[in-house]
């Protein structure tokens, strides 16, 4: 039995969104060291602000300034900060109800240890030295003893700014260790030999590629290895017109075609890029074969074989 594989994987992409007037004012306020909430019809002040009342679903837009000081309502100690978190030393995640607000804001609290944190602790904002209009403009919260600091009082800002933030780009990233299990480990091992191997269900006799170790139709375990392909048929496809960003192994000129390919002998289509043919000539039924690069662990792309197109009846169940 092949060794069960595991490897660290990272899923990462930039998430870009535009901002409505309420979120725009809130983030612009952070840039200007002003904390803004939004007032509901029944007089509650929500921080961070939302554009619709979570209770009544009524649209809300009346902005109100709150203080940069507040009270910890609940907390959890983070003894091992991870990459990208607000602080690189142990800290507490806290929910802080800012003075003047009726809801709590989640952020980091810089404290000497868990014994220094408790519900009811008074805290204040520590602003980032450089601010751009993001939640990270609040570097963190810190314990706060003074009760007469005039700087903690709101100034009555109305939420209007000369140069508002209108959009944000937030990087999304997930780091994890993936273990493909017995069936997919065998599949990946076969790919290193430029072979594609699936598994046959003992009940319905369908061959699944890549294998999952169980039949998704019958729910029974699979173990019979079946080599399929290498040739196959394009069942469906799409034309990609947006260039992949920050992905070295997808540095491909657009437009290009990504397709579902039913390998000969398989009862499930896998996906792959189509090359060696103009993108506007790719079609359902096109017969293709894999193209491997030196030391590649999977086909780089699939190209036409020159055979006549497959009849629709032969692959219609694999769409």
Image: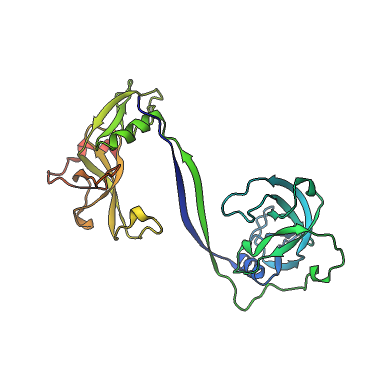
State the count of labels: 0
**269 in relation to 122, above or below:** above
The image position of residue 244, as x and y in percent, is: 37, 57
Q: Nearer the viewer, residue 245 or 310?
A: 245
Question: Residue 123 occupies which quadrant of the picture?
Answer: bottom right
Q: In this view of the protein, can residue 43 be seen by the observer?
A: no
Q: Residue at x 40, y 34 (%)?
A: 5
193 sits to left or right of 211: left
Quarter of the picture containing the C terminus is: top left
The image position of residue 288, as x and y in percent, is: 19, 44
| Coloring basis for residues | rainbow
The image position of residue 176, as x and y in percent, is: 49, 43
Quarter of the picture containing the N terminus is: top left
155 sits to left or right of 282: right
**68 in relation to 211, above or below:** below
Q: Residue furthest bottom?
A: 162
234 sits to left or right of 81: left
Q: Residue at x 65, y 61 (%)?
A: 59
Q: Nearer the viewer, residue 260 or 147?
A: 147
The image position of residue 259, as x and y in percent, is: 28, 47
Q: Residue furthest right?
A: 148
Q: In this view of the protein, can residue 158 be seen by the observer?
A: yes
Q: Residue furthest left?
A: 307
147 sits to left or right of 162: right
Q: Residue at x 17, y 41 (%)?
A: 310
Q: Nearer the viewer, residue 90 or 245?
A: 90
**292 in relation to 29, above or below:** above
Question: Residue 315 occupies which quadrant of the picture?
Answer: top left
Q: Nearer the viewer, residue 135 or 142?
A: 142
**219 in relation to 123, above or below:** above
């Amino acid at each position: 039995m092949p060794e069960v594989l595991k490897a660290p994987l990272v899923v990462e992409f930039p998430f870009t969104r535009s901002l409505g007037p309420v979120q725009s004012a809130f983030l612009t306020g952070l840039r200007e060291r002003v904390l803004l909430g939004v007032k509901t019809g029944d007089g509650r002040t929500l921080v961070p602000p939302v554009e619709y009342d979570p209770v009544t679903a009524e649209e809300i837009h009346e902005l109100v300034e709150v203080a940069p000081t507040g009270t910890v309502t609940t907390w959890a100690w983070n003894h091992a900060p991870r990459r990208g978190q607000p602080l690189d030393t142990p800290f507490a995640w806290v929910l802080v109800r800012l003075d003047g607000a009726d809801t709590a804001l989640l952020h980091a609290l810089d404290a000497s240890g868990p014994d220094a944190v408790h519900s009811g602790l008074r805290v204040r904002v520590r602003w980032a030295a450089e601010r751009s209009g993001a939640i990270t403009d609040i570097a963190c919260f810190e314990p706060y003893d003074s009760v007469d600091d005039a700087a903690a009082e709101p100034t009555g800002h109305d939420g209007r700014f000369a140069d508002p933030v209108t959009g944000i780009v937030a990087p999304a990233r997930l780091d994890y260790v993936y273990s493909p299990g017995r069936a997919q480990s065998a599949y990946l091992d076969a790919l290193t030999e430029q072979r594609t191997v699936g598994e046959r269900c003992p009940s319905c006799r369908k061959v699944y590629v890549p294998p999952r170790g169980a039949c998704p139709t019958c729910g029974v375990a699979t173990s019979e290895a079946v080599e399929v392909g290498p040739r196959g048929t394009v069942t469906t496809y799409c034309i990609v017109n947006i260039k992949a960003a920050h992905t070295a192994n997808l540095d491909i000129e657009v437009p290009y075609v990504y397709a579902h390919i039913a390998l000969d002998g398989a009862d499930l289509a896998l996906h792959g890029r189509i090359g060696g043919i103009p993108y506007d000539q790719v079609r359902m039924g096109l017969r293709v074969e894999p193209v491997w690069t030196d030391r590649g662990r999977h086909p780089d792309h699939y190209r036409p074989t020159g055979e006549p197109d497959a009849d629709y009846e032969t692959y219609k169940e694999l769409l």
